[in-house]
Image (cartoon, helix red, strand yellow):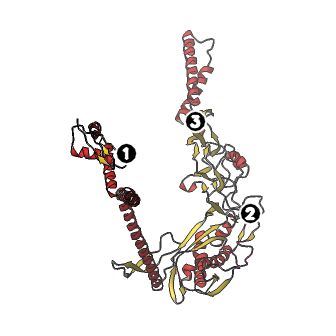
Amino acid sequence: MLGVLIGVLALGAGIVLMLKKAGPSTPPSGRLAFLFGRGGGILLVGIGLFMLASTSFVFVDADRVGHLKRIYAFKELPPGRIIAMDGEKGPQAEILGPGFHFIPLVRVLYDFEEYEVVTIPEGYYGQLTTLDGNAMPSGMFMAPAIPDDEVGDMLKAEVFLTNGGIRGPQETVLKPGQYRLNRYLFDLRLDEQTNATVIPAGHVGVVKSNVTQPGISCVEEEVSASEVSREALTVPLVPRGCVGIWKDPLFPGAYYLNRQAYEVTLVDTRVQTWEYKGGYTKRIIDLSVDQQGNIQQNERSVNEPVPEDAADRAVFVKVEGWDIPLELRALVQVDPENAPVVVGSVGGLVEIENRILTPAIRSIVRNVAGASIRVPDKADDGTLVEPASFTVRPTRVLDLIENRDALEQTIEQQIKVEGNKAGVDIREIRLGEPAIPPELLVSRLRVQLADQLSTAYERETDAQQKRIETEQARSTADEQPRLVEAQIAVQVANQREQERAALGRAERQYLEELARGQRAQVDVLGQDRVALLQALEKLLTSLERKPELVGLVGKLVPNTVVGGDGAGLAGAAALLGASIGGQTAPQSIGAQPGGAIRSTGQ
């Protein structure tokens, strides 16, 4: 302000000096003073103009927004308004963008401020509250949303205030990006509570709206979870854009919804597994076999706690007077179309589980398991009869094991009805292993163990017999060479025995034939001549075997002359006799008539 005052004074003084004129009677010295005075006036005018110009411009940085708040003006703001539209005192609707701005005496008439450009990060939204505008209509707590194509104009203070913008919380939110806002008009909230609403895969979002969009006809509609059951849950739902629970849920994706205007409840539409297990003490009888093959039994107890992720503890059913803990598993799923009914009726899937379906499941399981069962008829050999027939009879304890399928089907049929009433699809019911009292099973277990032991003994006996056979086969294989040699020796011995027997028979036959021939010779030649003939035959055989004896024949032939009529064996006998006698001198043996032999020497 002081600078402006100095500038005005300097400008005024300079103008005065510049306007002052020298008269005709002014002496030369006066004229020189006049010239210096005019130059001073020009300087003062320049100083004044500079002082005034320095208060008439502002410069706004690229990442800033200039705001003006007028201090001096002839107009006052209308009552109830805080943003000036026509140059009134107070915060101005106009904002200044980046760069140089020349406004006369802006530094004098206005208070100049800079604010940062608003940046909305990805995954968040900016929640707006306007400080000026028309009053909020009765029955509304939030200004209606403005279409996306009009948001850009709405962020201009002049347009917002001129076109009837409503003061207070705005349903319209700023999506990710950068904005130049008049911070005198718009108050922005950006924190962890203004993150985007993300509907993950396998879920839907049920919207409860607190605001109504302009121009939408809102009529509530009673929607039932099941069209076939009169006892099904029924909830009033409204179209999208109306106050209340929307009939159509939001599907997976990211939505920039004002948390003050909308409440979104996530509903898991994937298949859920509800387990009912634990919460009891299980008694067990263990069977064992000692070294002598005797069956021993020992009783023990195991505490079965309820798992943290279980829907509830096991269901206790009474069958034939026994209280039996029965574990089970249920597969359930919420159809996206029924999600608004589920949320509107009880609040969500967890509430459906705890308030409606878990009590129903426990009741139905107790009723079915403790009442009667429909089982298929079977033949004596255990096969199903043809055509198929069924018998309904009271449930037995062992049916929890042997006819589990029949119980599961009956329980599942009844549970499906209760699930449909609540808008939940029961996909499957599976019974777990029941904790049957061991007294009911020990006799069966002992029989099974005895049968297994008998089978084991039989297999061990077979194994021992096969081992013996294997060892025998191995030993036989090891002795095979000797066995072959022995078998060959036996065969050779038998062959030799047969050969000798044949030779004996041939020899005997030969001797018999020879004896008959000799008897015939004796009958013809006489005993002596036959003997001599045999001796001669043996001699000839010996000569044949020993050829070296042939040399003696040359000595025997020239020295012995056998004479006679050539009849009989006289010659042969003479030769034999000469050889035996060892005669060396040549002799002549003559046979006289009548068979006499004559010997001559040289």
State the CA–CA distance, disc 2 to disc 1.
165 Å
The answer to whether 36 is drawn above or below residue 282 in the figure is above
* Cβ atoms under marks 2 and 1 closer than 8 Å: no
Range of the magenta residues? 223-234
Q: Where's residue 46, x and y in %?
A: 57, 23
* Cβ atoms under marks 2 and 3 closer than 8 Å: no
Residue on which the image places disc 3 = 62
Q: In the image, what residue type sits under mark 3? A: Ala
Residue on which the image places disc 2 = 239
Q: In the image, what residue type sits under mark 2? A: Pro
The answer to whether 58 is drawn above or below residue 303 in the figure is above
The answer to whether 155 is drawn above or below residue 229 in the figure is above
Q: Where's residue 254, x and y in %?
A: 63, 53
**Predominant secondary structure in magenta?**
loop
Q: Quadrant of residue 547?
A: top left
Q: Nearer the viewer, residue 544 or 150?
A: 544
State the CA–CA distance, disc 3 to disc 1.
173 Å
* Mark seen at residue 10: none
Residue on which the image places disc 1 = 566
Determine the secondary structure under disc 1. Answer: loop
Q: Which of the two marks, 3 or 1, is nearer to us in this view?
A: 1
Q: Where's residue 417, x and y in %?
A: 67, 76
Determine the secondary structure under disc 2. Answer: loop
Q: Earlier in the sequence, mark 3 or mark 1?
A: 3
Q: Where's residue 372, x and y in %?
A: 62, 86
State the CA–CA distance, disc 2 to disc 3.
45 Å
Q: Which of the two marks, 2 or 3, is nearer to us in this view?
A: 2
Q: Which of the two marks, 2 or 1, is nearer to us in this view?
A: 1
